[in-house]
Amino acid sequence: AQKITQTQPGMFVQEKEAVTLDCTYDTSDPSYGLFWYKQPSSGEMIFLIYQGSYDQQNATEGRYSLNFQKARKSANLVISASQLGDSAMYFCAMRENGYRDDKIIFGKGTRLHILP
Amino acid sequence: DAGITQSPRHKVTETGTPVTLRCHQTENHRYMYWYRQDPGHGLRLIHYSYGVKDTDKGEVSDGYSVSRSKTEDFLLTLESATSSQTSVYFCAISTPGHLDNYGYTFGSGTRLTVV
């Protein structure tokens, strides 16, 4: 079963508008972490934001925030005031709490296009 | 910088030949990973290592082997390359065991084409 689901293969958004990228996840582990990564056309993977399963507040990093709805198993990324440089592929990912079995699982990604 | 390098950055090889990709880190991180990235699939884990000589399979390990003889190097070998292994390969490193702001640090990727 797919553990990370990103239902939007591609999105087009006007510059300066807010963007929400959807992510749902599936785990039976009470302790886990959720991540978002950005991959611009140059190909590097850039860490954006992290949310722990026990965190009471939604994570924020500058223009990025993570809308964490634990009961719905949802971890949407919100980008406020989008910029042309936000055009990229975005990956949602999850890390379950394991010591030896420590690995991150990625969704299939959403390609975001910011229109001028 | 992050202290993780992949080599080569680009490679074209023929079907049936063995290929080895190298990941080198200077961060002394215990965990190292190999992922492949393909359109429509995101990043999929091939193999990972949780210490010297300790490795385990990921979800797409068939046709790949790995070795880790020292902390800083994690090698991925395609024993007999096939066209289906044409992909971009990413190495990543992390420190395990706690769920704070620890994601991965990624290498720059290796673009492998099997013809």
Image: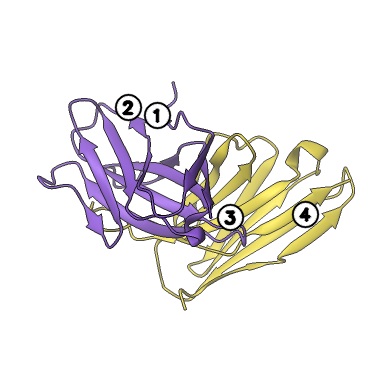
Q: Secondary structure at mark 2?
A: loop
Residue A65 position within the rendered picture, expressed as x and y whole percent measured from the top left: 27, 51
Closest to the observer, A79 or B112: A79
Residue A67 position within the rendered picture, expressed as x and y whole percent measured from the top left: 24, 41
* Mark 4 or 1, closer to the camera: 1
Residue B15 position within the rendered picture, expressed as x and y whole percent measured from the top left: 88, 43
Name the chain under label 3: B
**Residue bearing mark 2:** A26
Asked whether disc 1 touches disc 2, contact meaning CB atoms under 8 Å apart, the reply is: yes
Kindly identify which numbered label has been placed on residue A112: none
**Residue bearing mark 3:** B90
Q: Identify the residue shown where x is 23% and y is 25%.
A: A72
**Residue bearing mark 1:** A3
Give the crowd class for mark 3: few <14, some 14-19, many >=20 residues within 10 Å: many
Q: Amino acid at mark 3?
A: Phe
For the residues labelled 3 and 2, the Cα–Cα distance comes to 24 Å
* Picture quadrant of residue B73: bottom right
* Mark 4 or 2, closer to the camera: 2
**Residue bearing mark 4:** B19
Q: Identify the residue shown where x is 62% and y is 62%.
A: A42
For the residues labelled 1 and 2, the Cα–Cα distance comes to 5 Å
Q: Amino acid at mark 4?
A: Val
Q: Colour of chain B?
A: yellow
Q: Colour of chain A?
A: purple
Q: Identify the residue shown where x is 23% and y is 51%.
A: B99
On-image quarter of the N terminus of chain A:
top left
Give the crowd class for mark 2: few <14, some 14-19, many >=20 residues within 10 Å: some
Q: Amino acid at mark 1?
A: Lys
For the residues labelled 4 and 2, the Cα–Cα distance comes to 35 Å
